[in-house]
């Protein structure tokens, strides 16, 4: 559809698209630059850090994703392949995700011996190794 058929004429430097429903302007170099910088910043902002990861590790993986946008795929695949969200218990979920510390209210731990929590974590590690074919 030509702009001659639109009910109003576009402002100088602009044009209509999609049947006079979209007002557009030609892209400038700054538009293209902002688009690509925004894309790279989005790559850095969506890096998933592992539980307990150091600040140096976070900075390293952020720089890696900035310089090589596909560089974070191995971490993403590791998170997916761990299947942590499908674990039957919260403790196994934490073990699969690599976060073996869980904040528990003290009133739940009052009647438990101090060693029982550590014994459960050891059992989860052994169970996950057996499920994955390890020993």
Image (tube, helix red, strand yellow):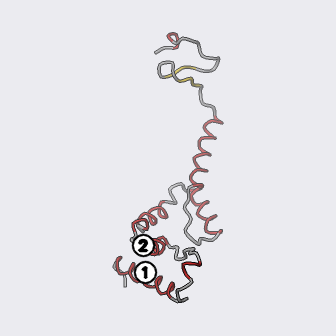
102 or 27, which lies in front? 102
Disc 2 crowd, CA 10 A, few/some/many (<14, 14-19, 20+): few
Up-down relation of residue 9 to residue 77 (above or below): above
Say what secondary structure mark 2 lies in: loop
Say what secondary structure mark 1 lies in: helix
Residue occupying image coordinates x 57% and y 78%: 107
Disc 1 crowd, CA 10 A, few/some/many (<14, 14-19, 20+): many
**CB under 8 Å between discs 2 and 1:** yes
Residue depth check, mark 2 versus mark 1: number of the one nearer the observer: 2
Residue 80 in the image: x percent, y percent? Answer: 43, 63
Q: Quadrant of residue 12?
A: top right
Please give left or right for residue 97 compared with residue 86 in the image: right
Up-down relation of residue 93 to residue 1 (above or below): below
Q: Quadrant of residue 130?
A: bottom left
Q: Quadrant of the C terminus?
A: bottom left
Up-down relation of residue 37 to residue 117 (above or below): above
Q: Looking at the image, is mark 2 or mark 1 earlier in the sequence? A: 2
Residue occupying image coordinates x 63% and y 71%: 54
13 or 119, which lies in front? 119
Please give left or right for residue 132 compared with residue 77 in the image: left
Residue occupying image coordinates x 57% and y 20%: 15
Up-down relation of residue 30 to residue 102 (above or below): above
Q: CA distance from mark 2 to mark 1?
A: 10 Å
For residue 89, the mark is 2
Residue 85 in the image: x percent, y percent? Answer: 43, 65
The residue under label 1 is 124
Residue occupying image coordinates x 56% and y 70%: 51
């Amino acid at each position: 559809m030509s702009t001659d058929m639109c009910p109003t004429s576009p402002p100088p430097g602009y044009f209509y698209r999609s049947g006079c429903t979209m007002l557009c302007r030609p892209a400038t170099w700054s538009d293209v630059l902002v688009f690509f910088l925004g894309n790279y910043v989005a790559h850095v902002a969506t890096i998933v850090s592992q539980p307990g990861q150091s600040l140096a590790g976070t900075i390293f993986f952020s720089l890696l994703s900035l310089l090589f946008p596909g560089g974070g795929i191995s971490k993403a695949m590791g998170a997916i392949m761990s299947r942590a969200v499908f674990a039957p218990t919260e403790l196994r979920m934490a073990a699969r995700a690599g976060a073996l510390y869980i904040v528990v209210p003290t009133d739940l731990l009052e009647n438990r011996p101090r060693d029982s929590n550590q014994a459960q974590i050891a059992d989860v590690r052994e169970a996950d190794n057996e499920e994955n074919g390890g020993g």
